[in-house]
Image: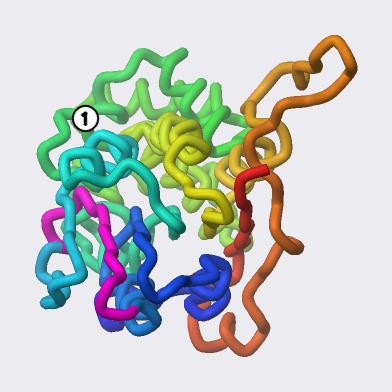
Amino acid sequence: MSYHSPVLLKESVDALNIKPDGVYVDVTFGGGGHSREILSRLGEGGRLFAFDQDPDAQQNKIDDERFVLIAENFRFISRFLRFYGVKKVDGVLADLGVSSHQFDEASRGFSTRFDGELDMRMNQKSLLSAKKIINEYEESKLADVLYLYGELRNARVLAKTIVLARAEGEINTSFELKQVLQKFLPKAKEHKILAQIYQAIRIEVNEELEVLKEFLEQIPDLLNDEGRLSVISYHSLEDRLVKRFIQTGKFSGEIEKDFFGNTNEPLKKVGKLIIPTQEEIKINNRARSAKLRIATLK
């Protein structure tokens, strides 16, 4: 739990409606909190596969013959499950976002609280880092990232400020970036604005929204009848994609109808949106923005 405090632990695993002999997938293993809870409900015939591309997560691997940890991005969920002879599963759990460990490890560059190298790569083998984006992206592209992924209205002036500053010397660390943008960070809103900036850069570094879309598109073909999808998201960009895909089977555009006016969305929601209790938020402040959505095949 010191590596990562799992959010909505009981609720998200309850959502899977676990069968003792079922096959389940935890696509965001992290500290293994959700995986351990799933395993506690599985019988001897059950199986659990987990995904995590972060090498740090490998230290939390669970010694259980029912468990397999796959060191890959969950955008490749179907491909790697087929490698293990699995074509259908009874449930998939995704706890999106950044783990507590990644936030708390200064050298990873995810946190606004610590001074560290501008990195933000969940996959340490990736060639694209936060430093590369800040120092090499064209001004217009940088502005688009800040606007689309950070929802920052002053994205263009922020991008211009960064470009002018880097012309004087490379911006390498979290605090250097903060210093460059200091005049746009009024004390009362500093943390909120920095969080939006960091979110935007992190999403770009890790292709988070593209990964989420690719993952969701594979779910209808992966789930068995009565199989469940349980997804925890932490910001509106993720949540909108999850909500819309469950509702329509698409991420944008009009819902397609057949000759008789029937729609063909593959999933249907189960229950209502679930958010953490005030008690959980008091214990784990990072739970405050979490939203859990549950779906099954239509």
218 horizontally vs 57: left or right:
right
Amino acid type, callout 1:
Leu
**Which corner quadrant of the image does residue 187 belong to?**
bottom right
Return the residue nearer the eye: 136 or 51. Answer: 51
Relative vertical location of residue 34 with respect to residue 253 in this rendering, above or below: below
The span picked out in magenta is: 43-57
Q: Which residue is drawn at 38% across and 65% down?
A: 22
Q: Residue at x 16, y 40 (%)?
A: 83
- Magenta stretch containing residue 176, yes or no? no
Q: Which quadrant does the N terminus fall into?
A: bottom left
Can see residue 57? Answer: yes
**Of residues 131 and 39, the one drawn nearer to the viewer in this rendering:** 39
- Percent position of residue 241, x then y: 60, 38
Q: Mark 1 points at which residue?
A: 128
Q: Which of 287 and 39 is in front in this view?
A: 39
Furthest-right residue in this view? 260
Q: In which quarter of the image is the C terminus?
A: top right
Q: Position of residue 39 (x, y in %)?
A: 31, 77
Tell me: residue 47, above or below residue 186: below
Whole-percent x, y for residue 106 in the image: 22, 62
- Count neighbours of disc 1 (C-alpha within 10 A) and say few if under 14, some if 14 to 19, many if 20 or more: some
Residue nearer the viewer, 279 or 88: 88
Residue 253 lies in quadrant? top right
- 244 horizontally vs 281: left or right: right
Question: Which element carries disc 1, helix, strand or loop?
Answer: loop
Q: In this orientation, does residue 119 appear?
A: no
